[in-house]
Image (cartoon, rainbow, N blue to C red):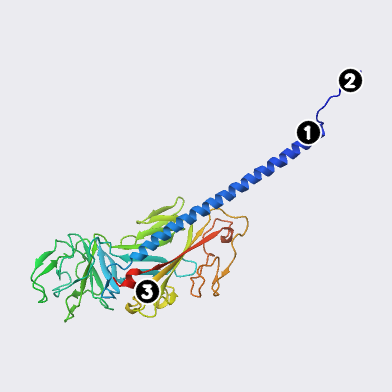
Amino acid sequence: MKPARQSGFTLVELMVAMAIGLVLSLAVGMTMVSMGQQFRSVAGTSAAQVGVQMALSLVDAAGREAGTGLFSNGQPLCQQFNAWRAGAVVSNGAPLLPARIVAGGSATASDRLIFTASNAIGPLSAMPVLAPMASTDADLAVTDSGLLALNDLVIVGIPGATTVPCSLFQVTAAPSTSTACGGNASQCKSVTHTANASYNAPAGTFTTETRYGFVSAGAVSGPAVVYRLGPQFRQDAFAVLCETLVRYNAFSDSPGCSTAPLTMRGGANALVPDIVLMKAQYGVSASASSDVVNDWVDASGSWASPGASDIGRIKAVRVVIVSRAKERGNGDVTAASCTNGSGVVNTGPCSFDDAQAPVINLSGVGVPSGANWRQYRYRVHQAVIPLRNVIWST
């Protein structure tokens, strides 16, 4: 009989099979790692995009409320204002614009956006000042109290004035009925704002201090009006700090930040991380009476501190926010430059396609040691915000 034939694998066959198995395992493993990196990159980019869109909606909402209570008879209530808070000067004739852009100073630095508006609940109308103030801290005689209450904030100014600042006051007593109305009414309301209160500065604090009245006469300036601002005066500000888009009250807060770990100070509310640049521009019309935006300008030159005639020309703002992906790519994944359709050259991606588009320059963004800015992917988010209260002059 022939012996039974044995079947099996030779040593060479086993080694070949093991080699093939190792190659396949390595390929599958590398594929999984690559897929994991791509998933993290896509998830991080998607999260950043959602976050920035939410932040843009907050910027848009603040912008659309800008100017509420700062206009009367189609004119800005004032060009600059005096304000005092908690024993310190907050504004000594500083600009008061419904929407103000503070330029970063260079193409690589972010701008800041500040929107000012009344947050009062209830009727919003100007109350004419009927009698001349005996002194800068004397009571204000107005046509009616306009729902003014104890501790409310008010702003008083002369619509259209170019050199007389507005003044921010706090009501320190419930308005009372008075007959001292300057001969302009038989009865009016007396609004008290005692000096040295939380928002009421002592005499001699500001460079230009005004006694307001029904008309200009001697040391008294008029015709002045009063607006109720409610319990708080807020200037909603948006800025990029520590590569994070933050929101804060520019009137009362002075924010800062630190990294490792990321912390915010001074009232800043962190909205979106991984934001590396924000640029903004004014949309201006040919005249204050026109509501058509015919040019976009940076907050530089004469537009760094617009005059009274130019404040009324600002009908909109537009903002560009650049976010960065968390994951570094393999090599340079972002183009070195982008030229838009109108010839504007950017160091990085483009934004708007017109000749006035803000310049994006990412060469100065911070990156880990050994990396460069082009090894990251970026997204550009942009919005145009009409200043409806400026257009409506309300």
Q: Which quarter of the rendering shows the C terminus? A: bottom left
Give neighbour class at mark 1: few <14, some 14-19, many 20+ (Cα, 10 Å).
few
**Label 3, on which residue?**
314
Q: Nearer the viewer, mark 3 or mark 2?
A: 2
Label 1 or label 2, whichever comes before in sequence order: 2
Residue 242 in view (yes/no): no
* The quadrant where residue 251 appears: bottom left
Residue type at numbered disc 1: Leu
**Label 2, on which residue?**
3
Residue type at numbered disc 3: Ile
Label 3 or label 2, whichever comes before in sequence order: 2
Give neighbour class at mark 3: few <14, some 14-19, many 20+ (Cα, 10 Å).
many
Q: How many marks?
A: 3
Counting from the top left corner in percent of width and height, residue 77 is at 27, 73
Name the element at disc 3: strand
Label 1 or label 3, whichever comes before in sequence order: 1
At x 18%, y 74%, the residue is: 211
**Label 1, on which residue?**
14
Mark 1 to mark 2: distance in Å? 25 Å
Horizontal arrangement in the rendering, residue 178 relative to residue 90 (left or right): left
